[in-house]
Image: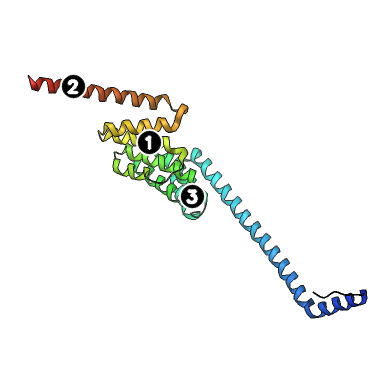
Amino acid sequence: MEIYQTEEQQVDAIKKFWSENGNGIIAGIVLGLGGFVGFNLYKDSVLEQELATSDAYQTLIESAEKDPESFAAKGDQFIKDNAATSYASLTALALAKEMVDKKDWAQAEKYLQTAVDKAPSDGIKAIATLRLARIQVQQEKLAEALASLSAQLPESFTAAVQEIKGDVYLQQDKKDLARNAYQAAIDADGLASSPGLQMKLDDLAQVINLGTVALNDSAKDSDK
């Protein structure tokens, strides 16, 4: 690195550097400012679009109460127009709830699958997946429900997953698997376990015990 002994040498060196590099520096500053302005314009544009989508979603949800008959058609169009946004999944969840109220299980299942596929976060995906599995259980699509519950979901949803699995196994008459699933749900939920879940486990234990007693009595009778 050069060391300048006098102020005159420093000034001459600065003049020489500027004459050789000044245009490049100016161009860099202009491009930098242009990029900064362009980036901010882009951010403003994205923000404006997001606000517009949010307003449209709010209007759509409010229309569900005022005009429920046209809500499905409007919701379908909204999902199509905003497929790449988080509002597509939220709209599908709202439409699924509407279909559940009408007991249209097949349509509710369709919307919940859309909500899963377009979920913007693991939390929303988990909520949609659990609801999907419950609707599949409602339709006695037990294998499909277990397949839905096999998805990788956040650990905080383990209790709910295990409880639904217990319901599926119970319908399949797999009592031991059902008992294990209910117990796993209680273990995962800890003190927060619902009384209903504990009741399911207690009732199942009683059924299993009665079945064991009946089986033993039958074996004794056959030995006589």
Residue 11 image point, x, y percent: 89, 75
Closer-to-camera residue (222/90): 222
Q: Residues within 10 Å of mark 3 (few under 14, many from 20)?
A: many
Q: Amino acid at mark 1?
A: Gln
Mark before the other along the chain sequence, 2 or 3: 3
Image quadrant in which you'd find residue 195: top left
| Point 36% across, 35% down: residue | 164
Q: Give the number of the disc on residue 56.
A: none
The residue at the point 74 percent across, 74 percent down is 27
Identify the residue position indicated by label 2 in the image: 214
Q: Amino acid at mark 2?
A: Ala
Left or right of residue 59, residue 130 in this image:
left
- What's the CA distance linking mark 2 and mark 3? 54 Å
Of badges 2 and 3, nearer the viewer stands 2
Determine the CA span between mark 1 and mark 3: 28 Å
Q: Quadrant of residue 181?
A: top left
Q: Is residue 196 visible?
A: yes
Three-letter code, disc 3: Ala
Name the secondary structure under disc 2: helix
Which residue is denoted by mark 1 in the rendering?
Answer: 162
Residue 199 place in picture, x, y as percent = 36, 24
Residue annotated with mark 3: 88
Which mark is first along the chain, 3 or 1?
3
Q: CA distance from mark 1 to mark 2?
A: 29 Å
What is the crowding at mark 2: few (fewer than 14 residues within 10 Å), some, or many (at least 20)?
few
In the image, 155: left or right of 145? Answer: right
Q: Quadrant of residue 70?
A: top left
Residue 104 visible? The answer is no
Q: In the figure, 23 relative to 112: above or below?
A: below
